[in-house]
Image (cartoon, rainbow, N blue to C red):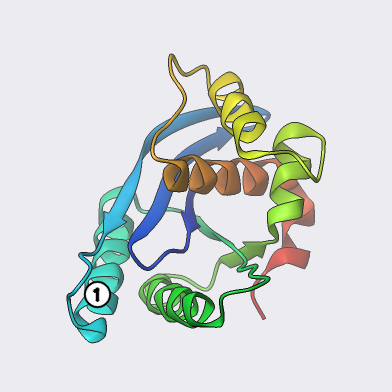
Amino acid sequence: MIVLGIDPGYALMGWGVVESTGSRMRLIAYGCVETKAGTPMQHRLRTLQLGVRDLIEIYKPDDVAFEELFFARNVTTALMVGAARGAAIIAAAEYTENLYEYTPMQIKQAVTGYGKADKKQIQQMVKLLLHMDTIPKPDDAADAIACAITHCQTGPAKAQFLMK
């Protein structure tokens, strides 16, 4: 199974592609779709949508896993990231119905065994689980890889995380 993990973002949308065979996982690729500050919103959203569409065409994932949004304070940022997430979901939904979502706490729990792990712990475990030489950068890409790992480890229980 090939999973495209996405960490939604407006300036940087992290992505990671992980292949899972049984209990073995292999990192295929990772990176970020980037938009430039000062560019009109509709152009930034289109860039994100086309970026996700390109990733899907290249890697042909069986499933696409998204990190759910969590914001405690900044409403403006939450709205912009929500719009970016929507653009990515539309691009993925054009390709497949196999769209899943995980909360940040579920991802932390799956990757580190601790639901309140910090970014460093997640990055170290991503590196360890996928036998990488270095921690993936930027953080957005590492988070997307962690989301893909979470989905791979969910196994038959994945149906409960299907987007509704």
Q: Can residue 1 be seen?
A: no
Residue 158, horizontal then vertical, whole percent: 72, 57
Residue 107, horizontal then vertical, whole percent: 69, 48
Q: Is residue 157 above or below residue 162?
A: above
Going 50% across and 48% down the picture, which residue do you hit? 144
Residue 66, horizontal then vertical, whole percent: 55, 62
Q: Is residue 44 above or below residue 60?
A: below
Going 41% across and 50% down the picture, which residue do you hit? 15
Residue denoted by label 1? 44
User: Which residue of the protein is positioned furthest toward the top in this rendering?
Assistant: 133
Residue 138, horizontal then vertical, whole percent: 39, 40
Give the image quarter of residue 80: bottom left
Which element type, helix, strand or loop, lies under badge 1? helix
The amino acid type, in three-letter code, at marker 1 is: Arg
* Front-lying residue, 158 or 66: 66
Number of numbered labels in the structure image: 1
- Binning the other alpha carbons within 10 Å of mark 1 as few (below 14), some (14 to 19) or many (20 upward) gives many
Q: Can residue 7 be seen?
A: yes
Which image quadrant: the C terminus?
A: bottom right
Give the image quarter of residue 115: top right
Q: Is residue 43 left or right of residue 84?
A: left
Q: Is residue 152 left or right of residue 16?
A: right
* Front-lying residue, 46 or 52: 46
Going 78% across and 66% down the picture, which residue do you hit? 160
Q: Is residue 119 left or right of residue 154?
A: left
Q: Is residue 163 above or below residue 135?
A: below
* Front-lying residue, 26 or 147: 147
